[in-house]
């Protein structure tokens, strides 16, 4: 059974509107030198790391944890970590944007072959002059201007990809 609107309980079936609303309520990941709770998981303290050769911040975390497990003082002082993070944060943000842009670019390159073809779309949200849609076959969101038909979140409709410009990050769909 799906959770009611605004409720963040777990649903046994995939509901794109509920997923969209939950995602919008989540705060962005934050890198900090002090312990923070993980709101989505409901944990008082949380850390995350992968292979230390993948990201520098993971190497920092490995060093910190290793020193504590060996009953030593932390590898980095809090002041040293704050200075490192001050340098890293803009780079981390740029890397995240670049990764999102790269994924979108290749998806849009694929969608260039789908121009003119009908696609199923799900209404995620209604705004005063547009609807926010999800193309579930590609898990990509896009907007469409208001049509003469009144649509509500969860409604499905058929759209046609009118144009795609991968380099510009533009995807235009029209109701069919």
Image (cartoon, rainbow, N blue to C red):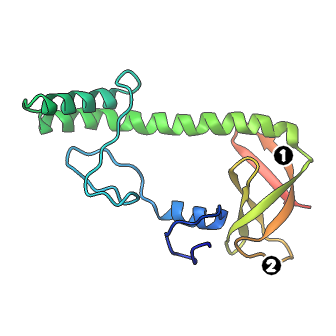
**Residue drawn at x 47%, y 33% as measured from the top left:** 95
State the residue in front, 105 or 53: 53
**Which quadrant of the rendered structure holds the C terminus?**
bottom right
Q: Quadrant of residue 79?
A: top left
State the residue in front, 95 or 122: 122
Q: Quadrant of residue 70?
A: top left
State the residue in front, 138 or 112: 138
Q: Is residue 4 left or right of residue 120?
A: left
Q: Which mark is residue 150?
A: 2
**Residue drawn at x 41%, y 59% as measured from the top left:** 40
Q: Is residue 126 left or right of residue 5?
A: right
Q: Position of residue 144 (x, y in %)?
A: 77, 62
Q: Which mark is residue 133?
A: none
Q: Secondary structure at mark 2?
A: loop
Residue 76 visible at all: no
**Residue drawn at x 79%, y 59% as measured from the top left:** 121
**Mark positioned earlier in the residue sequence (1 or 2):** 2
**Residue drawn at x 75%, y 63% as measured from the top left:** 122
Q: Position of residue 162 (x, y in %)?
A: 87, 50
Q: Is residue 138 left or right of residue 89?
A: right
What is the crowding at mark 1: few (fewer than 14 residues within 10 Å), some, or many (at least 20)? some
Task: Tell me the residue that label 1 is attached to.
Answer: 163
Q: Position of residue 129 (x, y in %)?
A: 72, 71
Q: Secondary structure at mark 1?
A: strand
Q: Position of residue 30 (x, y in %)?
A: 34, 48
Q: CA distance from mark 1 to mark 2?
A: 24 Å
């Amino acid at each position: 059974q799906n959770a009611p609107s605004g409720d963040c309980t777990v649903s046994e079936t995939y509901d794109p509107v509920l997923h969209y609303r939950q995602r919008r309520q989540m705060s962005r990941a934050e890198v900090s030198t002090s312990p923070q709770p993980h709101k989505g998981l409901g944990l008082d303290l949380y850390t995350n790391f992968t292979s230390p050769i993948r990201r520098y911040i993971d190497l920092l975390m490995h060093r910190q944890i290793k020193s504590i497990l060996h009953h030593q003082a932390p590898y980095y002082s809090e002041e040293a970590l704050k200075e490192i993070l001050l340098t890293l944060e803009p780079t981390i943000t740029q890397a995240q944007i670049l990764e999102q842009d790269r994924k979108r670019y290749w998806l849009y390159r694929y969608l260039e072959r789908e121009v003119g073809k009908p696609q199923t779309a799900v209404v995620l949200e209604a705004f005063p002059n547009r609807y926010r849609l999800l193309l579930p076959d590609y898990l990509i969101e896009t907007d469409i201007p208001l049509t003469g038909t009144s649509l509500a979140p969860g409604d499905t409709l058929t759209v046609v990809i009118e144009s795609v410009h991968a380099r510009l990050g533009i995807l235009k769909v029209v109701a069919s």
